[in-house]
Image (spheres, helix red, strand yellow):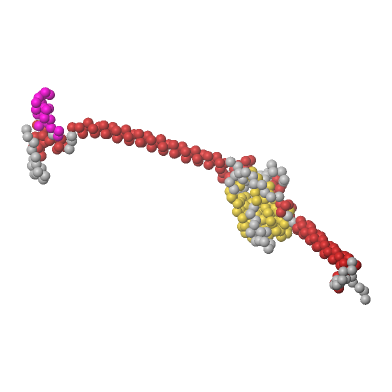
Amino acid sequence: MGLVFFAPGELGGFNQSWFYGQAAQYTAALLSMPYDSDESGSEPDLSILALARGRHPMTDQIRPMNNNMAYDDEVLSREQYEAEDTSLEEQANEESESEGSASEEPEEAVNLVDPATLGLKEISNLGRFTVSSHKPGNGVEELRSDDLKLYWQSDGPQPHKLTVYFVKRVGIRDIRFFVDYSEDESYTPTKIVFKSGTSENNLIEFATMAMESPVGWQQVPVAGAGGDPDGNTLVSYVLQMQILENHQNGKDTHLRGIKIYAFDPDAAQGAGRDTAAAEDEGAAGTFDTVDRLDDIVRDLAAARLEGGEAGFSIPDFMREPEIR
């Protein structure tokens, strides 16, 4: 059976069922030929059926291999992706855990300068301390104690307030308080607001502190409060400390100590007296040196005169004064 060729566009008008029937008969004839037939040696590379359906005999063998290879590659890439994705998730979890553990560790205590070396003295005894609430046995007395094992513990709603009423107008140069996250944990304050004014009903905020895991004495930023010529003194009649938040959203708070410092005029006067004395001693030493030089000049002039040097006369301002 010979092959029939059609020009492009001619397949649209003929009977397609007849065409496929002819292709099927040709395929059956090929399959019925004996294996050693002479006609079998001229096997066409492409049959009409293969051309009609767009398939090649080798295509059916190659396609499963390609599919398997593609599937294997797909599976391998998917496994690699999942492995990489899992490793990234584990790395992110490790980083988050390390950050969480680092945030839970207490901060190192900051070494503050001794107030005495700055010319400051404590004036906490000039104030009357009151708190908004406290547990029995953990009130103002424990807060004012020098024993840092004792503390004030609040017992009421936030914000927890510590108010100091001074007996007179004071100029505060430094405020320090002690907290210990390693001991108090959720009782440790993390956000504190400081206010000052002439009365409790007339307070102005001058500082805010945010702390993570504080341990030790903390210094309230007073610089720039506006008092005194340098602008670094807090002039106050009433001082208030408001604890707004605690660590881990704790309800009550612990405060283990508070100190208030002002400028010490006695220390300044002592330093001034020492400076003035040093200046006086320096001036006296200068005058003594000038007098000694004048004496040396007079002695030299007298020696030359006695030696008979002609033409040399002592100026009037160098002669000994005469009483007339």
123 sits to left or right of 161:
right
- Above/below status of 45 relative to 174: above
319 sits to left or right of 17:
right
Q: Is residue 134 visible?
A: no
Question: Which residue is at the far bottom?
Answer: 324
- Above/below status of 230 relative to 213: below
Q: Residue 91, position in %: x, y?
A: 47, 38
Residue at the (58%, 41%) spot, across then down: 105
287 or 103: nearer the eye? 287
Quadrant that contains the C terminus = bottom right
Quadrant of the rendered structure where residue 281 is?
bottom right
Quadrant that contains the N terminus = top left
Residue at the (62%, 41%) spot, across then down: 182
Q: Residue 251, position in %: x, y?
A: 59, 45
Q: Residue 308, position in %: x, y?
A: 89, 68
Residue at the (89%, 66%) spot, across then down: 307
Residue at the (35%, 34%) spot, across then down: 76
292 or 94: nearer the eye? 292
- Above/below status of 232 relative to 309: above
Question: Which residue is at the far right?
Answer: 324
Q: Residue 21, position in %: x, y?
A: 9, 34
Q: Is residue 144 magenta?
A: no
216 or 38: nearer the eye? 38
Quadrant of the rendered structure where residue 184 is?
top right
89 sits to left or right of 258:
left
Q: Which residues are magenta?
A: 26-46
Quadrant of the rendered structure where residue 237 is?
bottom right
Q: Is residue 22 visible?
A: yes
Q: Is residue 35 magenta?
A: yes
